[in-house]
């Protein structure tokens, strides 16, 4: 029997809270992208170790938070091995793919497959988006492609396959999150179940082991904060929005990551970033509010 604290945590939040939580989740995703890029592109840590530290630190952080918030939750009641396998597949394939892919083409393949997986899943489940949602989605996709398109070169075949698998896995993981009754516990035990799987990958990749203090710190931040907490927030959001909208809002992640580069890394603001940002955010706004019936109190 679930206690009161669990019920309150798992209850669907109000619309304003959903908007705030969605923003937090997307900011976490963008931060996660930056951390992964720093760690893997700079060679601070090997891909297998990064994935392992990321999932282990995420599991530990979430277990601590879950213990503090709700001691009565049992591990066999939430999450699933299927969701854990999708989480594991996403993290590992993403880590290894970025060794051989540029950031732009990697994002294009990843989010392209996420969109395809979630939109197909939504249609299969009977979701019938309105015309404004389709138009908004197409505008957001156009803005995303425009952002990542400059300088794209022929991608590595192996890297492309891995990133494609990562996108499919994340799409499935997100779709399954809509049925998770308790977001924090579900995310926690998905991470916990993924740990033995990723340890096997590290064991197989011992010959490529490379660790540095900087790489470990980046992996821990990625796992504990932008992945663990970010994914728990995302699972909370997924129960209150449609699969189509969940797919669409994720197209803002590259925009947010680029904006973070401007704010924290003193990168230049380009016309391409402004135009793509307006297309993506405008498309999302149209899809969400285009068919809304506003009531005046």
Image (tube, helix red, strand yellow):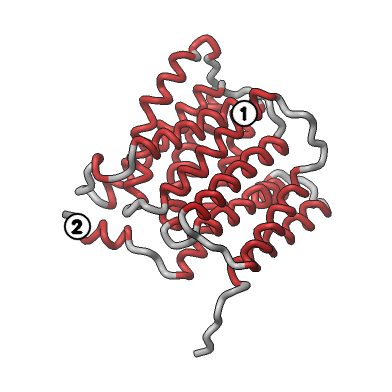
Q: Is residue 174 left or right of residue 152?
A: left
Q: Position of residue 137 (x, y in %)?
A: 65, 58
Q: Which percent across, then down, holds residue 89?
A: 48, 31
Residue drawn at (54%, 62%) of the image: 128
Task: Between label 1 and label 2, give the one nearer the viewer.
Answer: 1
> How packed is label 1: few (under 14 Cα within 10 Å), some, or many (20 or more)?
some
Q: Which mark is residue 3?
A: 2
Side of 203 where 285 appears, left or right = right
The residue drawn where x is 71% and y is 36% is 105
In the rendered image, which quarter contains the N terminus? bottom left
The alpha-carbon separation of the residues under discs 1 and 2 comes to 44 Å
Q: Nearer the viewer, residue 169 or 104?
A: 169
Q: Secondary structure at mark 2?
A: loop
Choose the circle earlier in sequence order: 1 or 2: 2
Q: Dividing the picture into quarters, in which one does residue 189 lie? A: top left
Q: Position of residue 218 (x, y in %)?
A: 54, 33
User: Which residue shows up at 50% across the image and 56% down it?
Assistant: 243
- Left or right, 141 with reference to 205: right
Dot 1: what SS?
Answer: helix
Residue at the extreme left of the image, as rendered = 1
Left or right of residue 200, residue 47 in this image: right
Q: How many marks?
A: 2
Residue appearing at x 69%, y 53% in the figure: 141
Q: Position of residue 14 (x, y in %)?
A: 42, 69
Callout 2 environment at 10 Å: few (<14), some (14 to 19), or many (20+)? few
Q: Which residue is tagged 1? A: 161
């Amino acid at each position: 029997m679930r206690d009161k604290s669990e019920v309150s945590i798992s209850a669907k939040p109000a619309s304003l809270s959903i908007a705030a939580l969605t923003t937090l989740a997307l900011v976490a995703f963008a931060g996660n992208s930056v951390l992964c890029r720093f760690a893997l592109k700079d060679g601070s840590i090997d891909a297998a170790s990064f994935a392992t530290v990321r999932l282990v630190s995420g599991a530990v952080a979430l277990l601590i938070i879950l213990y503090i918030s709700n001691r009565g939750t049992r591990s066999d009641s939430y999450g699933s091995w299927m969701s854990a396998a999708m989480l594991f597949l996403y993290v590992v394939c993403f880590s290894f793919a970025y060794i051989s892919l540029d950031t732009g083409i990697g994002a294009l393949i990843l989010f392209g497959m996420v969109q395809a997986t979630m939109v197909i899943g939504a249609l299969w489940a009977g979701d019938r988006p309105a015309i404004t949602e389709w138009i908004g989605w197409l505008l957001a996709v156009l803005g995303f492609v425009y952002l990542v398109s400059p300088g794209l070169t022929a991608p590595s075949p192996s890297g492309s396959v891995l990133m494609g698998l990562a996108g499919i896995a994340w799409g499935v993981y997100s779709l399954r999150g809509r049925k998770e009754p308790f977001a924090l516990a579900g995310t926690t035990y998905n991470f916990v179940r993924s740990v033995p799987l990723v340890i096997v990958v590290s064991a197989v990749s011992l010959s490529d082991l490379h660790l540095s203090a900087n790489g470990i710190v980046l992996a821990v931040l990625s796992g504990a904060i932008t992945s663990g907490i970010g994914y728990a927030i995302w699972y909370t959001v997924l129960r209150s929005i449609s699969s189509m909208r969940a797919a669409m809002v994720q197209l803002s992640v590259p925009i947010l990551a680029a904006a973070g580069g401007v704010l924290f890394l003193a990168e230049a603001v380009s016309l391409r970033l402004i135009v793509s940002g307006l297309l993506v955010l405008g498309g999302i706004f149209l899809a969400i509010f285009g068919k809304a019936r506003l009531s005046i109190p």
